[in-house]
Image (tube, rainbow, N blue to C red):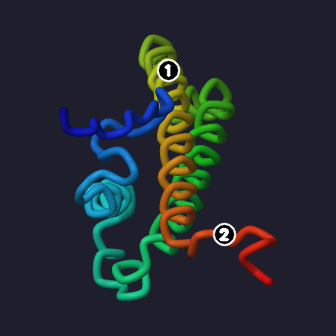
């Protein structure tokens, strides 16, 4: 009987669009997913295209900034939207939308962190034991 491939248990926060680390083409799927999180203009920046860890780091920063922006929008909705003439029902729907977006961005941030950790682990040379260093 042929040996079976080891099964990998992924975190529930692992993005479904990204293959598990170690599987064929997993880095390609990770890169595509990370690129999709950034504004399109970043696709032309060669350091981000060539270095997956830099791409992951930038995606992490981008998502963190989006979280901050949505928090500000949520926190200021009740005070600022009435002065803009927005109806109370629309304000309440907007607040719910921002709350849902914060949840989604939180999941994205956790997914980016997991993918970045996997890319870093994949790019590191195997650690040598103290006995191998002698």
| Residue picked out by circle 2 | 127
78 in relation to 73, above or below:
above
User: In which quadrant of the rendered view does residue 127 lie?
Assistant: bottom right
Q: Do residues under tags 2 and 1 come within 8 Å of each other at their CB atoms?
A: no
Q: Nearer the viewer, residue 104 or 114?
A: 114
Instruction: Tell me which numbered mark, 2 or 1, is placed earlier along the sequence.
Output: 1
Image coordinates for residue 46, horizontal then vertical, percent: 36, 88
Q: Nearer the viewer, residue 47 or 91?
A: 47
User: Residue at point 34% right, 56% down?
Assistant: 30
User: In which quadrant of the rendered view does residue 20 lie?
Assistant: top left
Q: Is residue 4 left or right of residue 110?
A: left
80 in relation to 69, above or below:
above
Q: Nearer the viewer, residue 4 or 44?
A: 4
Q: Quadrant of the C terminus?
A: bottom right
User: Residue at point 36% right, 75% down?
Assistant: 42
Image coordinates for residue 49, horizontal then vertical, percent: 34, 79
User: Residue at point 59% right, 55% down?
Assistant: 65
Image coordinates for residue 116, horizontal then vertical, percent: 53, 58
């Amino acid at each position: 009987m042929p040996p079976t491939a080891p099964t990998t248990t992924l975190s529930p926060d692992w993005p479904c669009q990204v293959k598990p680390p170690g599987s064929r083409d997993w880095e390609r799927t990770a890169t595509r997913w990370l690129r999709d999180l950034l504004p399109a203009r970043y696709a032309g920046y060669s350091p981000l295209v060539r270095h997956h860890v830099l791409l992951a780091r930038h995606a992490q920063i981008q998502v963190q900034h989006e979280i901050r922006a949505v928090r500000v929008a949520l926190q200021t909705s009740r005070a600022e939207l009435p002065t803009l003439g927005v109806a109370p029902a629309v304000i309440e729907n907007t607040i719910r939308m921002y709350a849902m977006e914060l949840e989604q961005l939180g999941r994205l941030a956790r997914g980016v962190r997991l993918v970045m950790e996997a890319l870093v682990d994949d790019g590191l040379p195997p650690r040598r034991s103290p006995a191998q260093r002698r």
